Image: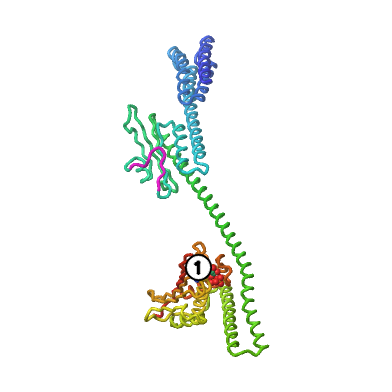
Amino acid sequence: MTRGLAAAAALTLAVVTALIALTGGGPASVLRHGFLLPVVALALAFGRLGGALGTGAALGLYAPVVLLEIERSGLTPETIEGLVTCAVVAGVGALGGALTTRARRQRARYETILTVQRALAGATPLEAALGRLRTVLIERLRAADVGLVVRDGAREVVAGADRVAAGSVAAGVLAVGTSVFVPDVGEGRRPRRVFATPLLVAGQPIGVLAVERVAELDRDERAALDALGVHIAVALENARLTSRQRRFAEELERSVASATRRLEELDRAKSAFVAVASHELRTPLTALQGFSEILAARSLAPEEVRRMAGIMRAEAARLGRIVSDLLDLSRIERGLEPTLHRVPVVVEAALVATADLFRRGVADTIVVDCAPALPPVDADPDALERILTNLVSNAVKYSPPGSEVRLCARRAGAMVEVAVLDRGAGIPGDALARIFEPYYRVPATSTVRGTGLGLAVVKALVEAHGGVIHVESARDAGTRVAFSLPAVP
Ligand code: ADP
């Protein structure tokens, strides 16, 4: 194709020259315009080089005709026309060639940019994307080698080398953010040129593009490489934003799924709670009703009356605790803090009172162990009583009958720490994180009476005092629930 065109151009030039000679038309012959055709064709086909060759050939054939005529008859209108034609042929050849070369370069750059975008598109890891980009750039830029460095958070991802060597051209460009041109790196017989340009995002270097070439790397091409650096930086930033957006969407999806799961669980727990709570409320009510009917209908021995009254008192207390827990929980769920009326409270007295409440004759199984000279705590006495009854009730409920329960208190800095220890079955590790959730009950303990509200209320009460609560437990090793309350200064 290119050879055919060159041959056709040469033939046209020869034919035009021959026709001018044969017709004896001289420099002003109308046939002289025929020289423009092959010159334009060569310039369009081969750019600058084609334009120059076409112009050279056309002028080589036509200029002698003009010059001979000038010699013969001096400057006449014909010879001046001839000179103008020479100038037009030279101008068209040079201009046409230059424009074609420039258009080609622009197209090549545009294609390179598209290649860059294609290489960086998709969800591949940065290392792989840079490797791919390096390969296509070596080919498109006709480079001996291409190096790419991109900062990704604290690390630097490098393609074309193991790492950025300290003091290297790339390190300098990354630090300063301006391009560097080395006309010869001094390896090999022919000069090896290196041009390194920063990849800039919002004026900040996020990486470096370094191109090594054995052939010429002129100013125009260096400017084009600077522009390519900007495009690569934008494409990288886009890829990064896309992957960040994707990660964010996945995270959001996971959070929504887990929140939905939690809500479903809570919903199930609430439904289960309604069943459990009705049962829990009905049991003491049935006992109260039954015993009160017996007391009303029969005349019993005083010890029997006392025994029944004791049971009724315990069941009424139980009923009261459940109702208080329910009221507290409904306040907590509405986002309200428990109302506290704080006064100095003597911890040992509160522990002894709670222990007495649960002892029911087995005197030695609930032990109170207070450190000497314990300061009083700044607490609401009712709230403290509810905290303690809930914890001691759990310790008794979830331990074998007659096993020891200890209530300990000691000073811990500005706080007083109270701990309730039992030697029961303990709480399995996976349930530990959930026992303070409202309605949650460890499945293994479902045969023991309970609502799953106690610890949620206890935690809210302790935290309302500015204290903290935590549980240590292991299966079959017992449980230790410790909470702190501020000591009175
Ligand atoms: P419940 O009314 O069911 O006792 P809580 O909120 O007080 O509700 O306790 C939540 C769950 O934590 C209980 O159902 C029980 O499984 C477990 N738990 C609490 N305290 C203890 C303990 N001392 N020993 C073993 N398990 C316990």
Q: Position of residue 471 (x, y in %)?
A: 47, 68
The residue furthest front is 301
The answer to whether residue 104 is above or below residue 83 is below
Residue 177 within the segment the image draws in magenta: no
Is residue 284 visible to us here? yes
| Highlighted magenta segment, given as a residue range | 155-165
Query: Residue 466: x percent and y percent?
Result: 45, 74
Q: Name the foreground residue: 11 vs 417.
A: 417
Which quadrant of the structure image shows residue 127?
A: top left
Query: Callout 1: 10 Å neighbours few (<14), some, many (20+)?
Result: some
- 90 relative position to 270: left or right: left
The answer to whether residue 456 is visible is: no
Q: Is residue 210 left or right of residue 311?
A: left
Residue 460 place in picture, x, y as percent: 51, 72
- Residue 276: where, in percent of width, then height? 62, 70
Q: How many marks?
A: 1
- Toward the viewer: 151 or 450? 450
Check disc 1 and report the residue beneath it.
425
Q: Is residue 83 above or below residue 357?
A: above
